[in-house]
Amino acid sequence: MPDAGVTPQRVTSIESRASWTAAAFTLAILSISYGAPLLVVVGLKPIQDSLGTDRSVIALAGALVWVGTGLGGIMMGWLADRIGIRATASIGAVMMAAGLALSSTGSIWALFVGHGLLIGLVGNGAIYAPLVVYVSRWFDRRRGSALAFISSGQYIAGVVWPTVFERGIASYGWEMTMLVYAAVVLVVILPLTVFCLRPSPEAHAIHAASAAPRKGDRVLGMNPNLAQALICIAAFFCCIPMAVPNGHLVAFCTDLGIAPAQGAAMLSVLLACAFLSRQFWGMLADRIGGLRAVMVGSACQAVAIAAFLSTQNEVGLFAVSAAFGLGFSGIIPSYVVAIRELFPASEASWRIPTFFFLGMSGMAFGSWLAGALYDHFGFYAPAFGVGVFFNIANLIVIGFLVSRRRAQQLAFA
């Protein structure tokens, strides 16, 4: 009970119509920016044939986008706190367009530099993680729903762009398709970043009045940086299996005799189901907490990735792809919710990008490893099997963290 004569401080939510407006503009930006890495996924075999190299080499270019995006997010998150999200995201749009243009020149090294450095490090690195932190600062009650909403930009891109890219590559070649998409990035993203992204509300007083963690507090009974390290390890493990269908589904289908157009459609179905289910996962994270939502999503992903091992006909693969999309879509936003629940708001600008770096490194490693295993064995079953292994490892780490969270809640009950 409060002391007699003391009026409890009223805590007002920072959420408003402007919060959802900021989220909507962010969704539009991410729907375009996440199209750039999909070009290598859809064009994996044509690019391989054009450059006369191994499939794992082209897969490595796509993997470098994930590593660059994760590493760049740490640097660009720091920069966004100093020069503002508008300037940072604008830099990202220009660099991404330059990366696509450079990659289209037809050299393996241009593909690596264009994807790893320009599209990844200073392109998507300046857009994705800084925008996630930006939107998280507009919300305090429905943060999970908001983060799920903006993260759906990845799946909107996955629904819209693979079929467009497949037709563009078939008609005009992968080089011209990259150049045209570079122009799309500039024409769409730059105006949105310059004119539509307003500064997020400051909420220091609100956070101080709430039960939010304070700097220096132990997290799950551990040193805060140890807890962060375990979350990052879990993210690395779960993103390895996540990368296999996302990076190799079209090529996997063509190896089975399924037409490239059907493979691209299958990737679109996977990402469409992810988009449709993501709001459910956001609401679940708001209700049961970020860590528990991660564990549920990871368990669903493990079942779906295992199903790829036993399914090789077209109808079955469409069904498994849809199930995979429904399962994995809530994992990444739920990690962000968990970090915001466990750590002080003032540390979000580096803790969230650090998590993204490890998660995207897992995506990169998984995409490259699947290509390397294919080059060695000549088929994709070993890649899916390794994905199941890492998914189980993720569940072990997350299960430990959830048990610590439960024990902490019981101790304070």
Image: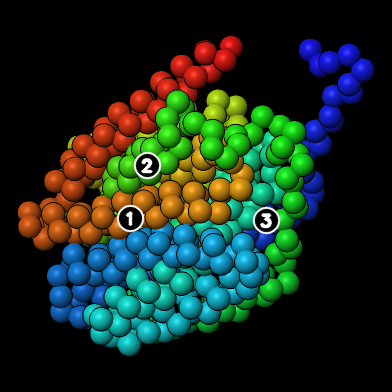
Q: Amino acid at mark 3?
A: Ala
Quadrant of the rendering where the C terminus is positioned: top right
Q: Is residue 410 above or below residue 38?
A: above
Q: Is residue 134 above or below residue 178?
A: above
Determine the residue positioned at 67% across, 56% down. Answer: 24
Q: What residue is pinned by disc 2?
A: 229
Can see residue 79? yes
Determine the residue positioned at 56% across, 49% down. Answer: 348
Residue 343's label in the rendered image is none
Q: Nearer the viewer, residue 187 or 64?
A: 64
Q: Amino acid at mark 2?
A: Ala
Q: What residue is pinned by disc 1?
A: 361
Per the image, label 3 sits on a secondary structure element best described as helix
User: Few, some or many C-alpha atoms within 10 Å of disc 3 (few <14, some 14-19, many ≥20)?
Assistant: some
User: Few, some or many C-alpha atoms within 10 Å of disc 2 (few <14, some 14-19, many ≥20)?
Assistant: some
Q: N-terminal of the two: label 1 or label 2? A: 2
Q: N-terminal of the two: label 3 or label 1? A: 3
Residue lying farthest left? 377
Q: Is residue 392 above or below residue 41?
A: above
Q: N-terminal of the two: label 3 or label 2? A: 3
Front disc: 3 or 1: 1
State the separation of the CA atoms marked 3 and 2.
Answer: 32 Å
Can see residue 132? no
Determine the residue positioned at 37% across, 74% down. Answer: 117
* Percent of width and height locating residue 296: 42, 29
State the separation of the CA atoms marked 3 and 1.
Answer: 28 Å
Quadrant of the rendering where the N terminus is positioned: top right
* Percent of width and height locating residue 183: 53, 82
Residue lying farthest bottom? 105
Q: What residue is pinned by disc 3?
A: 24
User: Few, some or many C-alpha atoms within 10 Å of disc 1 (few <14, some 14-19, many ≥20)?
Assistant: many
Front disc: 1 or 2: 2
